[in-house]
Image (cartoon, coloured by chain):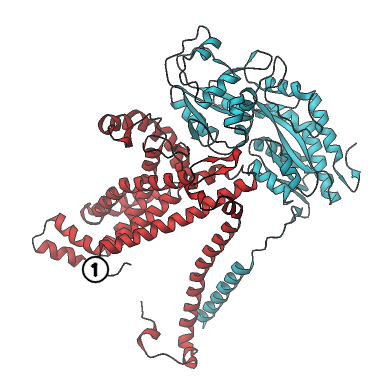
Chain colours: A red, B cyan
Amino acid sequence: MDTPAEQTSAPLTILERLRPSHLGDFLFRAITLAFASLVLVLIVAMLFEMIQNSMLSFQKFGFGFITATVWDPPAREFGALPFVYGTIVTSILALILAVPISIAVAVFVTYQAPMAIRRPVISLLVELLAAIPSVAYGLWGIFVLVPFMRETVNPVLRSTLGFTPLFDGPSFGLGTLTAGVILAIMVTPIITTVSRDVLAAVPSHQRDGALALGATQWEAIRVVFTYALPGIVGAIILGLARAIGETMAVTMVIGNRPDITVSLFSPSYTMASVIANEFTEATEQIYLHALIEIGVLLFAVSFVVRAAAQLLVRYATRGRNIGREG
Amino acid sequence: MRLKSRLITTGMLSLALLAGACGGASDGPVKPGGESNSGGLAIQGAGATFPYPLYSKWISEYNKKNPSLKIDYQSIGSGGGIKQITERTVDFGATDAPMNDEQLKAAPKEILHIPTVLGAVVVTYNLPEAKNPIQLDGPTVAAIFMGDIKKWNDPKIAAMNEGAALPDKDIAVVHRSDGSGTTAIFVDYMAKVSPEWKDKVGVGTSVNWPTGIGGKGNEGVSGSVKQTPGSIGYVELIYAKQNNLSVASIKNSAGKFVTPSLESVTAAASGVAARIPDDLRVSVTNADGEASYPISGFTYLLVYKDQDDAVKAKALVEFIWWALAEGEKMAADLGYSALPPEVLTKAQAKVRLINVGGKTFVP
């Protein structure tokens, strides 16, 4: 693409700007600016509306809302901590499971897969995973994944890692770990696809050079990674955002129990799930406002997690000779 | 140049869009329904999901007879139905649990409760060892769902199921995680038969469950129960029938174990008919009568008694009148229990009250 005239030459006078040749650029900028602002306006409007509609809960519970652990609608007692905890734990689990797989698939597709199956087979299949609606994942979760976790995976985990509190206690199949697994399956296509594009964008002479110097495949890919890291972290953050906000599939397999327990076998609850579950039948004002406040919290948690991830990237890539994050 | 003029148009369009997005949101009350595009009349309703299959059948049948009238029912949940009728954004609401006094007070005018059909909740379980349907009484079900009875071979369960091979197996409790009228009916019954439940858990469309796991919707609960040996849960009667689930017989207030069925639910409604209050807001759970199944409830239409628009009010009243007369006959086919005659009369009396400036619409 051409570089915009404004950036290469001296500032133009108003008259020059309005000359036919610049009018198009001016309009183009105005349009892109308008759409960019639209996103901002939408976010601010949403936040404003949500805070306004959760005022009752804000006033009644204050900051205690975030630290309270009891969610008891008939008693009108509302605390969000179990939901925040469940959201963060399932999302982290999903990333732990999905990131190694996604990056391995991306590397395989970009560098190692035979040309014949590279794009048509693997990429298509991975992208197909992204197109499955989440309620379909949820049903598959109930009827296939949950029994599989209960009969096969969880007993193995208990007999090998049962000494840690993470894999202790009874298992119904529904629970935190199952939710993490289903989320991992759902975020894998996102992380894979974006990572693949990032890897493909690294100039090939970097890898060729490394190979020419006698590097092994593994060493050459490490060279590529030095360049691709910020982009791959961006891919992971996109996956994380999906995991935090995912509702239906998680609701169907997590067990929906607002408890904070260490064991990954036990049921838990996420913020998005409680909103989806209880919003339609919440008739009391304070109940409704508490649910909307959970929505505000979800906004805040997404923001904080994202910011933390950005900081982590900056810390991890500090001092390295690579470009700014794209 | 063509390209440029197109660019300008796009720019103007996008600016107009932006302006619309900034200034468009007005929160004033919206008039529901009104004249539809085709020139006919439109009536809007919203609320409970449980009676949705029946209401949409009613609407399509009624539409065949009155093609100019358009009725639209959105199944957004009882909570939404109450909210929308209170805010007058719909012409009629629908709810499974009747509105409470506080909610009625929040409405601008008097709202009538018109029962249409009954729904029932069944206790379903997964116990391959038990050959015959198991039998339970209310306090035992409450103790199971509170986590006080933990094993299937508990003496309390065994006492009601002589001869049944009850295993020494943990009971896995499954309940609904989504707010639902099904839960409301179930916990209402629990609170009636167990003082401890009333104190510790209470009633509502969602409660703070003392134990167990939450499944989303009837399919979430039945899915978990089907797959987990030793589990117990509760679902709608229709759902259990369609999916051939094992259901427990429940001991009613007359001391008889009753299998849930359309007939035993209608019998329960007859059982409360004598003590039904004037506003028809009544709980049918734990009803009197030897044949009554104890865990059931009415589902209601919510309509303002004093209407403003005579044309629309007439159409609405005629539709509800037809639904109670003709529509009731379609209930059983779709798995709903029809109102018993004595309750139907009371429901019709409510429809007679709907008026515009004192003028009513049915004889």
Look at 81% across and 36% down and name the residue there: B321
Q: Does residue A209 show up? A: yes
Q: Does residue A133 show up? A: no
Q: Position of residue B136 (x, y in %)?
A: 57, 17
B277 relative to B235 in the view: left or right = right
Judge whether B54 appears above or below A10 on screen: above
Instruction: Check the image and name the residue furthest to the left.
Output: A214
Secondary structure at numbered mark 1? loop
Of residues B250 and A231, the one nearer the viewer is: B250
Q: Position of residue B251 (x, y in %)?
A: 62, 16
Q: Position of residue B338 (x, y in %)?
A: 73, 27
Q: Provide the chain ID for the residue under circle 1.
A: A
Placement of the C terminus of chain B among the 4 image quadrants: top right
- Amino acid type shown at disc 1: Ile
Of residues B45 and A257, the one nearer the viewer is: A257
A43 relative to A314 in the view: left or right = right
Image quadrant of residue A110?
A: bottom left
B202 relative to A38 in the view: left or right = right
Image quadrant of residue B141?
A: top right
B209 relative to A220 in the view: left or right = right
Q: Position of residue A324 (x, y in %)?
A: 29, 69
Look at 36% across and 58% down and name the residue there: A308
Instruction: Check the image and name the residue furthest to the top.
Output: B163
User: Where is mark 1, residue-wise?
Assistant: A322
Judge whether A12 appears above or below B245 on screen: below
Judge whether B362 appears above or below B193 on screen: below
The 10 Å Cα crowd at callout 1, few under 14, some 14 to 19, many 20 or more, is few
State how many labels appear.
Answer: 1
